[in-house]
Image (cartoon, helix red, strand yellow):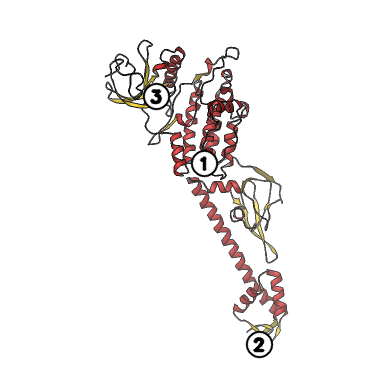
């Protein structure tokens, strides 16, 4: 138990504020501190459990506005019953004694700490961080559905537990939409973290705050994940705030200069639009695109082709692969000077990825047989998918490998067919244009036939000669090719 006023108020590591009457708690030490409050770990002797004990800083205890905001934080948090928002257990609001509330103890690290640790150790934690951000979006979307704006979203306000628990904390600046001032009533008070703050908040335009203000801050968290720093970083607090007022963050860039996923950059910059009308209209829309990126199903550009249109041509350099969404196509290639049909392609099938992955020319021509719609998978997109550290990456790599193996087998088979055709053409020529030789043989001048075989197959003359002389019954006899009986 605590007495009242037995420790100096300056001793922030110990709980010095009076404990409300009837609260039987034991101080276990400081958990954390912010600009307005401190949080201690205490043991509730009545229930036999540890809880977080949050109190207003002693120097703010007599300020009416600070006291009101502290109580409002407890009430707002208590009304948001969501798995990613820590529950509040009890509130005591007594200006003469103490104002405090208890809530769930959160074990783990903040997202900010995790990002810093990953950067220090060179760990690529992109997809793990995106998963956390999705859960934060769920909590914010829930609050919005209850008419509450958070207005202080940043990595240090996201707690990640050892067993996957994720909590959005510090609702001290949260506002109920119905209680926001009108334009005429607004006093222009600026509260929040300038490094992540939307311009309307940084300008003190509290009448203009809405769900898109939180969308902006979520974009700022994504920016921090991508670039290793917040969207607004000045030399000091004042210059950082000036940048927030302007609201024009540069596109995120990695410190090592390596490219980052373009879709994530585009999503980040849309969320960080200075004009709220250009941002995602809701947190749910932002969350959906994040999930689509994580699953690898983000919207791809589409093209339409009329019957007979060639989508890719044999021999061309390939910069994109294609997935058939609607329609059917015919794949073909030229073999021994003749067009050879390879296979029909239908919805859901990909083609053209071999040239993209290997940098080699297209191995076939693909022509639309009817009105056909395809999704365009360009080289950067395909490379991004292959670099994923997720199960989707494994699936894409497996499928890509299968396509490469299939195309390699097809190419090898076609090459073998050309070589076998050399023997077939030789026998046909001997039968139709050859003449009888000694011992019942059939003969023809070799050099003239060799030139004909080269023109029809395109194979090297050495390979043609090797193939023909290996065939049963065929021999080179001086300047003639002979077929024994």
Q: Which residue is mark 2?
A: 440
Along the line of sight, which residue is nearer the eye, 18 or 402? 18
Q: Residues within 10 Å of mark 2 (few under 14, many from 20)?
A: few
Mark earlier in primary sequence (1, 3): 3
Q: Position of residue 299 (x, y in %)?
A: 59, 40
Whether residues under marks 3 and 2 lie with C-beta atoms below 8 angstroms apart, the answer is no
Distance between the Cα atoms at labels 2 and 1? 71 Å
Label 1 or label 3, whichever lies nearer to me, is 3
Residue at the extreme top of the image, as rendered: 96
Mark earlier in primary sequence (2, 1): 1
Local secondary structure at mark 1: helix
Q: Is residue 240 above or below residue 339?
A: above
Q: Quadrant of the N terminus?
A: top left
Label 3 or label 2, whichever lies nearer to me, is 3
Q: Quadrant of the C terminus?
A: bottom right
Label 2 or label 1, whichever lies nearer to me, is 1
Along the line of sight, which residue is nearer the eye, 230 or 410? 230
Labelled disc at residue 87: 3
Q: Is residue 290 above or below residue 99?
A: below
């Amino acid at each position: 138990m605590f007495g009242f006023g037995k420790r100096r108020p300056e001793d922030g590591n110990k709980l010095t504020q009076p404990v409300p009457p009837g609260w039987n708690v034991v101080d276990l030490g400081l958990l954390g501190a912010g600009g307005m409050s401190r949080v201690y770990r205490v043991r509730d002797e009545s229930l036999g459990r540890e809880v977080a004990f949050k109190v207003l800083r002693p120097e703010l205890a007599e300020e009416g506005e600070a006291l009101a905001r502290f109580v409002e934080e407890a009430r707002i948090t208590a009304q948001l019953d969501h798995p990613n928002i820590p529950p509040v257990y009890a509130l005591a609001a007594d200006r003469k004694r103490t104002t405090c509330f208890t809530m769930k103890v959160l074990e783990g690290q903040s997202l900010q700490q995790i990002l810093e640790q990953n950067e220090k150790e060179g760990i690529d934690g992109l997809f793990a961080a995106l998963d956390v951000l999705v859960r934060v979006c769920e909590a914010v979307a829930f609050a919005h559905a209850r008419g509450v704006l958070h207005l202080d979203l940043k990595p240090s306000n996201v707690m990640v537990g050892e067993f996957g628990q994720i909590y959005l904390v510090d609702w001290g600046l949260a506002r109920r939409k119905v209680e926001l001032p009108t334009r005429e009533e607004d006093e222009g008070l600026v509260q929040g973290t300038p490094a992540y703050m939307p311009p309307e908040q940084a300008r003190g335009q509290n009448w203009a705050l809405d769900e898109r203000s939180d969308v902006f801050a979520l974009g700022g968290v994504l920016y921090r994940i991508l670039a290793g720093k917040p969207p607004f970083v000045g030399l000091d607090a004042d210059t950082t705030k000036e940048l927030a007022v302007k609201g024009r963050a540069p596109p995120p860039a990695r410190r090592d200069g390596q490219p980052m996923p373009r879709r994530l950059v585009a999503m980040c910059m849309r969320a960080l639009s200075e004009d709220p009308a250009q941002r995602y209209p809701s947190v749910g829309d932002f969350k959906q695109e994040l999930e689509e990126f994580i699953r690898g199903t983000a919207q791809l550009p589409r093209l339409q082709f009329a019957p007979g249109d060639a989508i890719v041509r044999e021999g061309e350099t390939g910069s994109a692969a294609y997935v058939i969404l609607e329609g059917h196509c015919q794949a073909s290639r030229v073999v021994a000077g003749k067009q050879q049909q390879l296979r029909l392609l239908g919805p859901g099938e990909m083609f053209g990825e071999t040239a993209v992955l290997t940098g080699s020319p297209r191995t076939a021509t693909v022509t639309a047989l009817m009105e056909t719609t395809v999704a365009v998978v360009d080289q950067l997109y395909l490379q991004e998918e292959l670099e994923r550290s997720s199960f989707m990456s494994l699936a894409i790599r497996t499928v890509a490998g299968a396509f490469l193996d299939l195309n390699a087998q097809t190419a090898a088979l076609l090459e073998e067919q050309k070589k076998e055709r050399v023997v077939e053409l030789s026998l046909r020529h001997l039968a139709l244009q050859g003449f009888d030789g000694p011992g019942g043989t059939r003969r023809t001048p070799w050099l003239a036939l060799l030139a004909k075989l080269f023109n029809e197959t395109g194979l090297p003359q050495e390979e043609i000669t090797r193939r023909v002389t290996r065939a049963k019954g065929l021999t080179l006899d001086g300047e003639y090719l002979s077929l024994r009986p």
